[in-house]
Image (spheres, grey):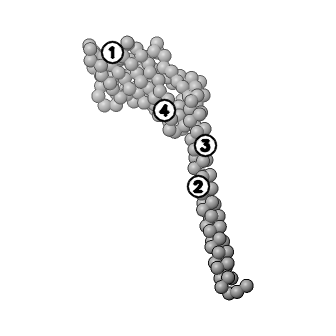
Amino acid sequence: MSKKSASPLIATVLLIGFAFSLGVIFMTWFSESFKSHSSEISEKGEREIKCTFASFKAPKFLVSYNFSVTPPHVNLTVINTGSEKLYNFSFTVITKRGEAVLSYIFVPLEQKTEKNPLEAGRSWVVTIIPQSYSPSSEETVKEIQISALCQKEFAVQYRVVLEE
């Protein structure tokens, strides 16, 4: 072999070796990145599937309210009918005064938290009060919209319709 033919052969071998090394580095990096993303997606998917079995109800016959006192309040019982813990409840009370329909944000006097959730199969007797504006004594409750968190990020909702 002459010197002229050996030089291109060495260059080709070096180029192939360099390309192969880069390929191995990128494959390792991409596979690690893919594993971490797929585990995150898998965990979120599992939580979402669990939350499909989360549900609650608030029977309308267990709802009472009094807007003539200070603070005006609504009492209701929330029953966890699902298989998951629920917490961070929020309440929207829709009222009616004549033909006017009004909406208020209510908050519970004692909130269910992630550390103290409403366990599956348990009930919670809760008193909720207006967060800022209060309904007048002439208003009647038309509907209560309730939402709660399941597994830190999925909302579960329920409506109690008292008046059509």
Q: Is residue 68 visible?
A: no
Give x and y (percent) for residue 6.
68, 82
Residue 80, compared with residue 5, is above or below; it is above
- Between label 4 and label 1, give the one nearer the viewer: 4
Disc nearest the viewer among 4 and 3 = 3
Q: Disc 2 vs disc 1: which is toward the camera? A: 2
Q: Give the mark, 4 or 1, whose residue is nearer the N terminus.
A: 1
User: Residue at image x 59%, y 34%?
Assistant: 49
Q: Which residue is mark 4?
A: 155
Residue 140 numbered mark, or none: 1
Name the disc covering residue 33, or none: 2
Q: CA distance from mark 4 to mark 3?
A: 19 Å
**Quarter of the view holding residue 20:** bottom right
Q: Position of residue 131 (x, y in %)?
A: 34, 31
Which residue: 54% across, 37% down?
A: 151
Mark 2 vs 1, N-terminal side: 2
Q: Are marks 4 and 3 in contact (CB under 8 Å)?
A: no
Disc on the earlier residue, 1 or 3? 3
Q: Position of residue 90 (x, y in %)?
A: 42, 30
Residue at mark 2 to residue at mark 1: CA–CA distance: 56 Å
Q: Give the spatial CA distance, label 3 vs label 2.
A: 14 Å
Residue 21 drawn at (x, y percent): 64, 68
Mark with earlier residue (3, 2): 2
Q: Badges 2 and 1: C-beta atoms under 8 Å apart?
A: no
**The C terminus, quarter of image:** top left
